[in-house]
Amino acid sequence: MRFEGTDSFVATEDLKVAVNAAVALQRPLLIKGEPGTGKTVLAQEISKALGKPLISWHVKSTTKAQQGLYEYDAVSRLRDSQLGDARVHDISNYIVKGKLWEAFEAESAPVLLIDEIDKADIEFPNDLLLELDRMEFYVYETRQVVKAKQRPIIVITSNNEKELPDAFLRRCFFHYIKFPDRETMQRIVDVHYPGLSHLLLHEALTSFFELRDLPGLKKRPSTSEFLDWLKLLLAEDIGPELLRERNAAKLIPPLHGALLKNEQDVHLFERIAFLARRG
Amino acid sequence: MFLAFFLALRVAGVKASLREFLTLQEAMAQGLAGFDVEHFYYLARVTLVKDERFLDKFDAVFAEHFKGVLQPPAEATGEVAPHDIPQEWLEKLAEKLLTEEEKAQIQSLGGFEKLMETLRQRLAEQKERHQGGNKWIGTAGTSPFGAYGYNPEGVRIGQQESRHKSAVKVWDKREFRNLAGDAELGTRNMKVALRRLRRFAREGAAEELDLTGTIRSTARNAGYLDLQMVPERHNAVKLLLLLDIGGSMDEYVHLCEQLFTAASSEFKHLKHLYFHNCPYETLWTDARMRQADAVSTTDVLHTYDHTWKLVIVGDAAMSPYELISAGGAISSWNQESGQVWLKRILDAYPKAVWVNPAPERLWNYTQTTRHIAELMERRMYGLTLEGLDQAMRRLMH
């Protein structure tokens, strides 16, 4: 059972090694990288490639580690007790299972995606140390130990908004998805738009990498934005000739809104275009 | 295995732990690296490096170490440990790649040892040439192995020749260089640093369930459920930000902008005012510092009481007169000297720090910077993540 990328996802050699190591040694895999380099998609693709179900846990700033294990709904139990509901006698009726519990319980080891772990409070990863390490936890209310039937494949993504604690990192494999080079990019596009004319792709890639190299951009366009842009180009039926018109007035690539998401960046780009036109 | 490499990593500041090293061993034992150098590199990277800032260091150590191992360096540095491993490494490599006949041929050539020695030299040679920027070409003409098809291209180390070439390049490329070291400060990172400065208090609309309150009032209500709500917790820290603007601060504008963006989103109670070089009797609410935006410093001291925390951002570099003598200010006539005003401000705000965007190593070269640091009782911190972090800790002290 090796991960070799899928027909919709181009995995570089180092990424394959990272994923396979994590799968073989059953350690969580921590993925970082520029936004839009396919961190979240990776988990979906692993689940697809290995034929395992995917359980996603999207972390928000208010997410607590406990919510991934289970939650005890005290308020509805209190309410039921006043209404005289029979359910009230069994506390397990009010235990709401979290994503980790779900993953531990699954019959075949699933892929568990813990998305954007850095969004949560700084203590969040620490609260999950034991659970990720031993793959078990204790439910106080029902005095039961939930233990993973099979250790799930855990993929954790981070956007680096907060530093993760050392103890947590020690337990993970770490992979930094670097921005794909031109060659990889070509393969990625081939996967997404198989019928794309070679000429258009060439021109689009040139424009794109030129744009990315522009110094001073606040947010450099990423792979996913490039793919969106290509889609737009195709939809608008813009040919390679138009992209190639790099002279004077046409310095800004058509439909640049898909690539530049920041007002200041667009301004910067227009200024440079203006200077180029004068010069 | 690879203990020396592990130790070299630690010496270089890649803080890999024993646990991770054991994980690597486990992975090796499971044959995850195969006998491919490139895979070993990826595997070691994925297990030992946990922060993209260290990727470049890792690459450097990897290149250095395995170069040093393949051909012992002329002068052994104290840090690079002995090279007992590559022998096994090379043997395995050869075992995998050579057929039985080839091995027999080796025997006739003077044995395995001899081959290994040559192979080792070959690899080191390749490394050097590669660094020199040339593509490696098998030196078949001079090689005793050439005739037997053993020029290193023929041996095909790492099985695929093209892959091997790129394997050498992978860590030599040092692609992660720009992620290394003092990573540029993004506002998000600053926010994280500023988050140290949090004192929670509940005020505003009641939105959260107050569990203790609910239990208490339910008990009082003869057991009939009575839900109680409380307002969400908010950061109650009050921050007064004084920003130096213009002149020598121009080169730090971008940095200060970031700090300001980060601060304004983190603190609900934030008041910012501007000054030029040193605060005197007047402060400005706008960076353009027009007459209409001027406020009296005394008024400010009276409006915002000592519960506010003060952060002054400035490079503290000015002519000494601006600080120590009356009338020394460059923008207007000041009745009292800059240091008198500074002292007055510091007396009003016991919780105060000075954040200096100039590089810390330059502070000692500027007389006024030293002087102000003294006035601040050494509460001057650099405008770096680490400096901010220390400054915020100091403010919470």
Image: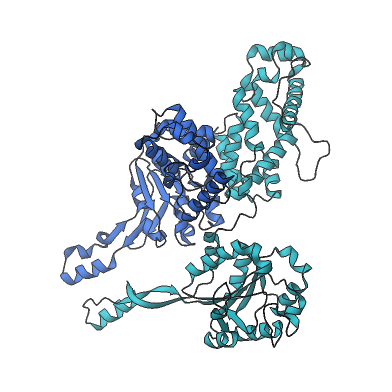
Chain colours: A blue, B cyan
**In what quadrant of the picture does the N terminus of chain B appear?**
top right
Residue sitting at the far right: B75
Q: Is residue B311 above or below residue B253?
A: below
Residue A60, picture quadrant: bottom left
Residue sitting nearer the eye, A45 or B269 = B269
Q: Is residue A4 visible?
A: no
Q: Is residue B263 above or below residue B68?
A: below
Residue sitting nearer the eye, A207 or A142 = A207
Q: Is residue A30 visible?
A: yes
Residue found at x 40% / y 77%: B202
**In what quadrant of the picture does the C terminus of chain B appear?**
bottom right
* Left or right: B124, with A94 as reference point: right
Residue found at x 77% / y 16%: B143
Percent position of residue A265, x then y = 50, 52
Residue sitting nearer the eye, B316 or A171 = B316
Q: Is residue B275 above or below residue A177?
A: below
Q: How many marks?
A: 0
Percent position of residue A197, x then y = 42, 27
Residue sitting at the far front: A278
* Left or right: B144, with A162 as reference point: right
* Left or right: A118, with B185 as reference point: left
Residue B297, picture quadrant: bottom right
Residue found at x 20% / y 67%: A80
Percent position of residue B368, x then y = 75, 74
Q: Is residue B182 above or below residue B222?
A: above
Residue sitting nearer the eye, A209 or B282 = B282
